[in-house]
Image: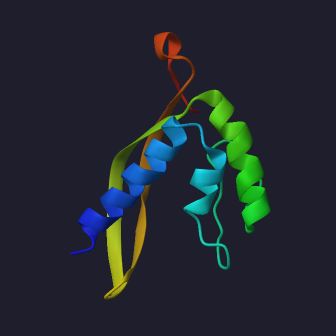
Amino acid sequence: DMYPIAQENFNAWNEALREKDYEKVAGLYSSTDLSFLPTVSPKFIRDPQSTKEYFMEFLKKLPDGTITSDNVQRFGPDAYLHTGMYTFLTGPADNRAPVE
């Protein structure tokens, strides 16, 4: 069962967001084979430098993510795909708002 590992990795990623450390967040992505559609950007990201630049800006919004629905597919003894939906709240603690 890879679900506990996927949860642990998501929590590490979310904690890096809370620490506002864009280098740490970007370092959690593959340096050789990455791609993702960012939460608050229409740009499809496919390289480490763009990943750093995106998170440098995104972290200024003070994001915090919560998984609302997810699925983990195992592809081998040490490989899985973690997909799903999550909600981000952004802004200062006294004025949080969901990302839309």
Q: Quadrant of residue 29?
A: bottom right
Q: Quadrant of residue 92?
A: top right
| Numbered-mark total | 0
Residue 49 percent coordinates (x, y): 78, 61
Which residue sits furthest top? 94
Task: From the top left corner, tell me how far across and down residue 78 is, in percent.
Answer: 36, 84
Closer to the camera in the image, 23 or 53: 23
Q: Residue at x 39, y 60 (%)?
A: 9
Q: Is residue 38 above or below residue 32?
A: above
Residue 100, compared with residue 45, is above or below; it is: above
Judge from the rendering whether residue 66 lies leftward or rightward of residue 5; answer left or right.
Answer: right
Residue 52 left/right relative to 2: right
Front residue of this view, candidates 47 and 69: 47
> Does 71 appear above or below 17?
below
Q: Position of residue 18 (x, y in %)?
A: 50, 36
The residue furthest bottom is 76
Residue 30 location, quadrant: bottom right
> Residue at (50%, 19%) from the top-left corner?
96
Say which quadrant the N terminus sits in.
bottom left
Of 5 and 98, the residue lying toward us: 5
Q: Do we see residue 42 in this rendering?
A: no
Applied colour scheme: rainbow
Q: Residue at x 40, y 55 (%)?
A: 10
Q: Is residue 46 left or right of residue 38?
A: right
